[in-house]
Image (tube, rainbow, N blue to C red):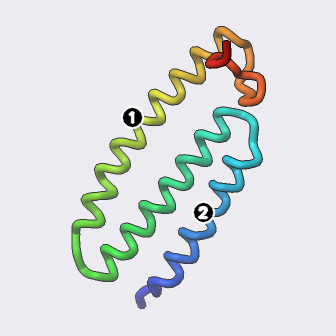
Amino acid sequence: MEIPLSYYLCLSVVLFVVGVAGVLTRRNAIVVFMCIELMLNSVNLTLIAFSSFLGSITGQALVFFAMAVAAAEAAVGLAIVIAIYRNKRTVDIDKINILKW
């Protein structure tokens, strides 16, 4: 028994919408990064679903590289958040204005 492609796509859309809602409504930088990762994972789920549906391995290869880039992005993003926290003592996006004069 195989799960239909539409189930994977619906789950991916729900994950992406939750991620977008989190990015737009949250003010904590760490939560925003987590929501961005959730959106990236929803795109990865879509790539895997279409790859399985079409019987091709190219989608799985793209997901492999996307996950490697996401791991590097998460490490760099967390390092930036930690550096900002050390200087400003907050991770609230509204209170961080280091690029303003």
Q: Residues within 10 Å of mark 2 (few under 14, many from 20)?
A: many
Give residue 24's position: percent from left, percent from top: 71, 49
Between the C-alphas of marks 2 and 1, the distance is 21 Å
Horizontal relation, residue 70 to residue 18: left or right: left
Residue, far front: 101
**Would you name the residue on which mark 1 appears?**
72
**Residue 55 occupies quadrant:** bottom left
Q: Find out whether the residues at labels 2 and 1 contact each other: C-beta distance under 8 Å.
A: no
Residue, far bottom: 1
Q: In the rendered image, which quarter contains the C terminus?
A: top right
Residue at image location 53% in from the left, 81% down from the top? 7
Give residue 22's position: percent from left, percent from top: 70, 50
The amino acid type, in three-letter code, at marker 1 is Ala
Residue 6: image tag = none
Q: Earlier in the sequence, mark 2 or mark 1?
A: 2
Give residue 74's position: percent from left, percent from top: 48, 35
The amino acid type, in three-letter code, at marker 2 is Leu
**Would you name the residue on which mark 2 appears?**
15
Q: Secondary structure at mark 1?
A: helix
**Residue 33 occupies quadrant:** top right
Q: Secondary structure at mark 2?
A: helix
